[in-house]
Image: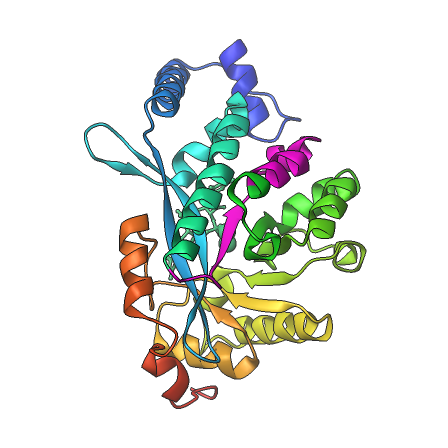
């Protein structure tokens, strides 16, 4: 009965589910995964990968988005979509999340000391972390510990999180913004767009979701949505970032629309810290990516 109840809750409550024996296998699988996650945390199996965000204006790396990976003892790499929901359900996200913030600060300062001192880091926050009243204090203590300039840290929060907790987290936002930390709305356009938070909260940046970028140029609806998001963002004075840019046509299109930064497989997949450092060293300030600046604009295909 307990297993059936959990299944019903997974499906969004307000439903009736009968127990069937296959559910046992699922529950067992979950229990194993939960045990493995606890082991992973204790044994330092979590690592951060970093994906560059490039300025379309000058082709330089402006920021690194920290993305969580789980490297198991046998060397297999588990993607976050497979285990973050369970970290959230078990409450482990608080501990792992605190580690992510600390690790990102520690890594950023290392890169700054190596001469890449204008680099910014973006860290994804889970909605459970955001609901925690102590989160602002935790983040502020980390940037103080590692002496990270506040404006070099950007926090990514999804749109649905803002809509769900908008009112409850205003104090947290105020504390963070007052310190100079930047806030970006992740996966913009995919939540239950209540735009009221855009003028209530001091957001700095919008990240246009990959699902819109995927179908441009060519799909008139996606093009129109991307154009509208850029228009909205620009008129609110926000920085615009295009996620999931996989080819030059998409890159040229979003650049022509007025997007500030691009991130995606066209330029780089998420990289280990060591590989990211190589990329940084290979693209010093005077050596931007050539196609970013010189490609012909392809807005009309
Ligand atoms: P996100 O924050 O929207 O991250 C972008 C995701 O898109 C990453 O997947 C990245 O690898 C992927 N991506 C980037 N460029 C491309 C591209 O050109 N094509 C395609 N097909 N994909 C691209 P990843 O690393 O698997 O992360 C998935 C999601 O998991 C993230 O979405 C974020 O919501 C969550 N996540 C990742 N790391 C963390 C973390 O440290 N904390 C929290 N709370 N959530 C995280
Ligand atoms: Mg993100
Ligand atoms: Mg995203």
In the displayed structure, 185 sits above or below 82; it is below
Q: In this rendering, would 186 be left or right of 67?
A: right
194 magenta-colored? no
In the displayed structure, 156 sits above or below 252; it is above
In the displayed structure, 4 sits above or below 94; it is above
Residue at 33 percent across and 82 percent down: it is: 290
Residue at 52 percent across and 60 percent down: it is: 209
The x and y percentages for residue 130 are 65, 37
Residue 272 can be seen, yes or no: no
Region rendered in magenta: 115-142
Q: In the image shown, does 192 or 115 lie closer to the viewer?
A: 115
In the displayed structure, 288 sits above or below 85; it is below
120 magenta-colored? yes
Q: In the image shown, does 257 or 171 lie closer to the viewer?
A: 171
Quarter of the figure with residue 278: bottom left
Farthest left residue? Answer: 74
The x and y percentages for residue 288 are 36, 77
The x and y percentages for residue 48 are 38, 43
């Amino acid at each position: 009965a307990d297993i059936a109840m959990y299944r019903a809750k997974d499906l969004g409550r307000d439903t009736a589910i009968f127990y069937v024996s296959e559910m046992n296998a699922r529950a067992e699988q979950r229990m194993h995964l939960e045990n493995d996650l606890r082991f992973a945390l204790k044994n330092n199996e979590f690592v951060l990968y970093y994906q560059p965000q490039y300025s379309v204006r000058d082709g330089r790396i402006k920021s690194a988005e920290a993305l969580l990976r789980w490297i198991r003892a046998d060397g297999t790499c588990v993607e976050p979509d497979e285990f973050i929901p369970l970290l959230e359900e078990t409450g482990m996200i608080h501990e792992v999340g605190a580690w992510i913030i600390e690790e990102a600060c520690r890594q950023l300062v290392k890169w700054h000391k190596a001469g890449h001192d204008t680099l910014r880091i973006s860290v994804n926050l889970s909605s459970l972390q955001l609901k925690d009243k102590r989160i602002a204090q935790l983040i502020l203590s980390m940037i103080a510990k590692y002496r990270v300039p506040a404006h070099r840290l950007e926090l990514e929060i999804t749109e649905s999180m803002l809509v769900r907790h908008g009112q409850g987290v205003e104090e947290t936002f105020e504390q963070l913004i007052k310190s100079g930390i930047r806030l970006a709305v992740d996966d913009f356009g995919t939540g239950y767009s209540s735009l009221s938070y855009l003028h209530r909260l001091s957001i700095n940046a919008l990240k246009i979701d990959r699902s819109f970028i995927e179908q441009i140029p060519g799909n008139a609806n996606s093009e129109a949505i991307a154009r509208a998001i850029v228009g909205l963002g620009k008129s609110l004075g926000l920085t615009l970032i295009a996620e999931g840019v996989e080819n030059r046509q998409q890159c040229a299109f979003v650049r022509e629309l007025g997007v500030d930064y691009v991130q995606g497989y066209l330029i780089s997949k998420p990289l280990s810290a060591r590989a990211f450092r190589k990329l940084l060293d290979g693209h010093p300030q005077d050596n931007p990516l050539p196609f970013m600046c010189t490609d012909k604009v392809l807005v009309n295909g």
